[in-house]
Image (tube, rainbow, N blue to C red):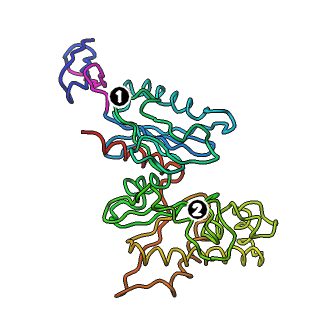
Amino acid sequence: MEICDGPGAGGGWRLVCVGRPVPGWRIILQPHTRNLKPQTHALGIDLGGSSIKAVTVTPDGETLSRHNLEFDPDKNMEWAEKIRALVQSVETERAKLADSIGLSAPGLAAANGRSIACMPERLQGLEGLDWTEFLGASKTVPVLNDAHAALLGEAWVGAARGFQNVIMLTLGTGVGGAGMVDGRLLRGHIGRAGHLGHSSLDPDGPPDCAGTPGSIEVAIGNCTIQERSRGRFQTTHDLIAAHLKGDTEATAIWLKSVKALAAAVCSFINILDPEAVIIGGGIARAGKALFEPLEQFLDPIEWRPVGQRAKILPAQLGEFAGAFGAASNALKLLP
């Protein structure tokens, strides 16, 4: 056997000659990593209420790995230590530190984009934590709101790809949101822009966690399902399951919530004039049970000049949307 190292594809192949060069000899090309440079990649991290989602991706959006870590929110700063360990693990896995690291989390991002400035009552220690310093990173670790990150992710490699004007709503325990106008994420004066779930539909309704009366979050968020069903259902999943089985009471409760959502979406369309409205979050996994009645409620109320209408689309990236958005945000800092 003779082994000859050659340039191949940029020095990435080893030529192995098995046997003497006579009739019947074979040439085998084997990957050879001695001269390969580690692949450029970004690490996007999305911190949730009890779990951490992360992706390593190339600048063109190719996914190299995904990570899903659970943590105990009652254990002081456990989430922070798990993120630090994750960064070190990915460095070992990829044989280099990520070229850029980005993070998303609930709350309002600081003006300098290095921390979460406001996140009351949850994830103690998150407010004011400078992630660049905490991770010992040589480059800035940009931080942004989780809903903003979800839209950036969908706009990069998901359902909103190719759109310049788009709205995203995330339906889950609460209702999150984000907006993009002319290709730019709306952040606002203090990072509050896009919190669409706190838009009021009923000025006399009960307040949500932000104090907004009768908000979209109150109308469809999982946080109010017990009140809306008078204690009959513990989760929106249970409500929808009963609706699909023909339970008339469940159907009435569910369709009332979807009708409220349609009214809100109609208003957002008039305010921001999007090409599409992307809907994600756990409740969006209901699929047709959500999207079909939503379209039916929108049809008679959406203003459609010269026949133009906004597309209503399900999100594509699922629970990793925020991680992809965090990675996209970090890649923008690369030279």
Residue sitting nearer the eye, 243 or 175: 175
Q: Is residue 111 left or right of residue 20?
A: right
The kind of residue tagged 2 is: Val
Q: Could you tell me if the residues under marks 1 and 2 are in contact, i.e. CB atoms within 8 Å? A: no
Mark 2, Cα crowd under 10 Å, few <14 / some 14-19 / many 20+, is many
- Taking the magenta stretch, the answer to whether it contains residue 29 is yes
- Where does the C terminus fall, quadrant-wise? top left
Q: Residue 122 placed where, x, y %?
A: 63, 45
Among the 4 quarters of the image, the one containing residue 44: top left
Mark 1, Cα crowd under 10 Å, few <14 / some 14-19 / many 20+, is few
Q: Mainly helix, strand or loop, the magenta region?
A: loop
Say if residue 28 shows up in the picture.
Answer: yes
Residue marked by disc 2: 175
Q: Residue at x 41, y 58 (%)?
A: 189
Say if residue 25 shows up in the picture.
Answer: no
Range of residues picked out in magenta: 23-39
Q: Residue 12 placed where, x, y %?
A: 25, 26
- Where does the N terminus fall, quadrant-wise? top left
Q: Is residue 170 left or right of residue 305?
A: right
Q: Tag on residue 294? A: none
Q: Residue at x 40, y 37 (%)?
A: 141
The kind of residue tagged 1 is: Ser
* Real-space CA distance between mark 1 and mark 2, rounded to the nearest whole angstrom: 35 Å
Residue marked by disc 1: 138
Mark 2 lies on a secondary structure that is strand
